[in-house]
Image (cartoon, grey):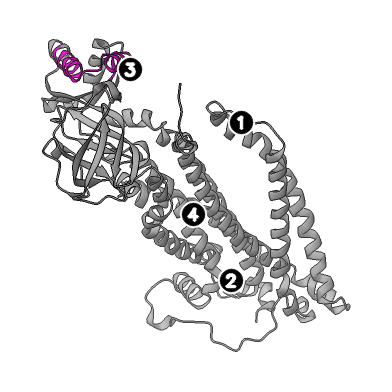
Amino acid sequence: MFGSSRELVKTTYVMEMVIAAVILLVSICLIAISVIMLRFTIVFTINEDFKEIGIMKAIGIRDSSIRKLYIAKYFVMALSGALLGFAASIPFSQGLLLQVTEKIVIEEGGGSILFQLLISMLIVGVIVLFGYLSTGKIRKFSPMDAIRSGNRGERFRKKGVFQMKRSHVKATTFLACNDVASELRKYLVLFFTSIIGVWLVVMPINTINTLSSEKIGAWFALTECDFYLVQEDKVAELIVQGTKQGWYDYLEESKERLEQDGIEVEKVTTEIYFKLRVRKGEKSYKSFAIQGLGTSMEQYFYDEGQPPVYENEIAMTHVVADKIGAELGDTVYITCGGREKPYLITALYQSMNNMGEGIRFTEKEELDYGEAGGGFGAQITLKQESDRENLTEVTDRAQKLFPEAKVQTTKEFISSMIGDIAGRLEPLKLLILAVVVAINVLVVVLMQKMFLIRERGEIGMLKSIGFSDGALIGWQTKRVMLVLFLGIAAGTATGTPFSEITSGRVFQMMGAEKIEFVVNPLEIYAVYPAALFVITVLACVIAMRRVRSISVREMNHIE
């Protein structure tokens, strides 16, 4: 009943591949953040243990032996986490495969389990390796660190970029800006984590907004209309009938029924698709082809050339042109109804329909409708602007008038055609935001804990000269706010270009040459960056409440 190549069968699951590609891109970014976090956490732990390390060195324990203690600890922790993650991944992966296995018959076996176990062991190895590299700082510690609370009482460089006498800001603001400017390396983890975090949030949002935009019809090479009447039984009947006039009669009947109900219609059009062989020289390809009925060739978007006008002129997608080595202005031969006929390529266009395949005929050309594969339903264009403004009400009336049909807007029609990718990615937005916020909060809390350990003497001194706990919390928080703002601003500015080089490849998989992402400024530049900033700053304020436990006596340990 059906015969085709393996490649064609694989492309029928491209929508599942698109979702998988977006999730994979998100996972890669999370891995990058994890690597940054891993090193930061290990370095923080070693800095926190300066007393223990100094004491062990004082009693004669060598650096290599101390490092082995840490490596053993990280190995046990990594192994425990990897085994727990491996156990949790089994039901999780089954849940992800559930939708796919409804469409694909796959063999059950232990191969995937062994692969997951291998990945888990690889993660353990990576963590242990990073642990070993990050514990190199142990060589720099000495027994003096344990005695002087991590300070050696020496510093041979000036700590300061700005001058207090020339600034007109609060003391805590000056201190915060000066700290960030003079010791930028201490804040790079938060800076890069914020950038990648914003990328993670922006990428799926841009992808979803683009797939849900009004432009989506043009990218699928469809003409503009207000809504679709999708009647699968009627389309099947017309295909069996196999005449062009049958489609015209159907369009006229649909228009009359709508107008009898008081819905004023400007025009009713449709697009019929075929699967035809096109040839240039020795190269040939069986391509998806379309002929619009009631449409105008000027309504469609073309990348190069001019819209076809005469019967022997066609427009062709870049994908099909590349398959047969054709260019603008070339003559190709298309077989329809058992006869081969020459056609002139007057335009090239892009389409995400049928993996980028496409040949568009003018309405004047007489094709064999016995070879038609189907149609995109009746496309209704309303006459009154008031009806367009109340489109939901009009479609509800049309649905009652055509109970046997699906009444869909352009976005709904394409969404159903491509498997509702945008709807299936929608829950991913909040999930990614939650993960990014959690990571940022973790980074800030760890950073602040490390700063409190290293700066107890400075905090004690500031308290002794009259700084209140609130002012000190403000000083510490402003440092984080400054770095966080710079990271989020950089991530927001580069988020859309990042989307173009990552999830933009997904659209290329579907046949698009170039996609302009639809950016919702309120989401991209306000709501999500603000949420990320505010939640992280609140976590910083909460973490810095420990400043109250530091007394003036700590100034004895200052450098």
Label 2's element?
helix
Left or right of 514? Residue 63 is right
Residue 519 visible to an observer of this rendering: no
First in sequence: mark 3 vs mark 2: 3
Q: Which residue carries the number 1 mark?
A: 106
> What's the magenta bit mostly, secondary-structure-wise?
helix
CA separation, marks 4 and 2?
36 Å
Label 1's element?
loop
Q: Amino acid at mark 1?
A: Ile
First in sequence: mark 1 vs mark 2: 1
Q: Which residue carries the number 2 mark?
A: 463
Q: Position of residue 69 (x, y in %)?
A: 82, 65
Q: How many residues crowd mark 3 within 10 Å: few (<14), some (14–19), many (20+)? A: some
Looking at the image, which is closer to me, 197 or 479? 197
User: Residue at the location (33% across, 17% down)?
Assistant: 232
Q: Which residue carries the number 3 mark?
A: 232
Residue 359 visible to an observer of this rendering: yes
CA separation, marks 3 and 2?
78 Å
CA separation, marks 1 and 4?
36 Å
**Eyeballing the image, is 111 above or below 49?**
above
Q: Which residue carries the number 4 mark?
A: 197
| 3 or 4: mark nearer the eye | 3
First in sequence: mark 3 vs mark 4: 4
Q: Amino acid at mark 3?
A: Glu
